[in-house]
């Protein structure tokens, strides 16, 4: 990350815009990560912020690990513990935002 004289190289620092494009999020999202300490950064001036390569790589690794764990958990845990016979078929047949038909209306 640093040269022989320990000076940081320009290619080891990234802008908010780079991180924004990398994750496909808004600038406000990246600024939120910076503000709450999720993504360490260096403020060089009132409008100049840089994110170090090592910090960005760690941030990516943590988010990737969390995403993979969430996906694995969703894959292994059943969405509903009840047997299929106990599920209310009416709730699965109505459109989103539409009330399920009552039994009296169907008769």
Image: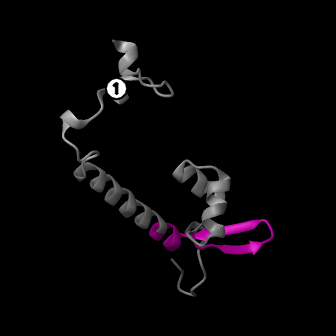
Q: Residue furthest right?
A: 46
Asked whether residue 14 is in view, the answer is no
Q: Nearer the viewer, residue 37 or 17?
A: 37
Whether 44 is among the magenta residues is: yes
Residue 101 lies, in percent from the top left, at: 41, 20
User: What residue is drawn where x is 44% and y is 62%?
Assistant: 63
Q: Is residue 94 left or right of residue 88?
A: right
Vertical position of residue 13 compared to residue 86: above or below? below
- 105 in relation to 23, above or below: above
Q: Quadrant of residue 94?
A: top left
Q: Position of residue 39 (x, y in %)?
A: 57, 69
Is 82 positioned to the left or the right of 40 in the image?
left
Q: To which quarter of the image does residue 8 belong?
A: bottom right
Left or right of 14 on screen, residue 100? left
What segment carries the magenta color?
Answer: 39-58
* Residue that extends furthest to the top in the rendered view of this protein: 107
Q: Report which residue position mark 1 lands on.
A: 90
Image side of residue 42 versus residue 107, left or right: right
Residue 62 in percent (x, y) is at: 42, 67
Q: Is residue 74 magenta?
A: no
Q: Residue at point 47% right, 25% down?
A: 99
As drawn, the residue found furthest toward the bottom would be: 5
Q: Nearer the viewer, residue 91 or 55?
A: 91
> Would you place residue 11 above or below residue 26 in this image?
below
Q: Nearer the viewer, residue 43 or 28?
A: 28
Residue drawn at point x = 62 percent, y = 70 percent? 36
Circle 1 sits in a helix, a strand or a loop, which is it? helix
Q: Badge 1: how crowded within 10 Å, few (<14), some, or many (20+)?
A: few
């Amino acid at each position: 990350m640093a040269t022989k004289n320990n000076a940081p190289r320009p290619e080891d620092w990234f802008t908010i815009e780079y991180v924004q494009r990398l994750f496909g999020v808004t600038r406000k999202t990246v600024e939120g990560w910076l503000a709450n300490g999720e993504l360490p950064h260096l403020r060089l001036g009132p409008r100049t912020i840089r994110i170090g390569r090592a910090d960005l790589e760690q941030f990516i690794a943590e988010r990737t690990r969390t995403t993979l764990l969430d996906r694995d958990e969703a894959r292994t845990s059943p969405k509903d513990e009840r047997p299929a016979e106990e599920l209310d078929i009416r709730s699965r047949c109505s459109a989103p935002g539409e009330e399920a038909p009552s039994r009296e209306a169907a008769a």
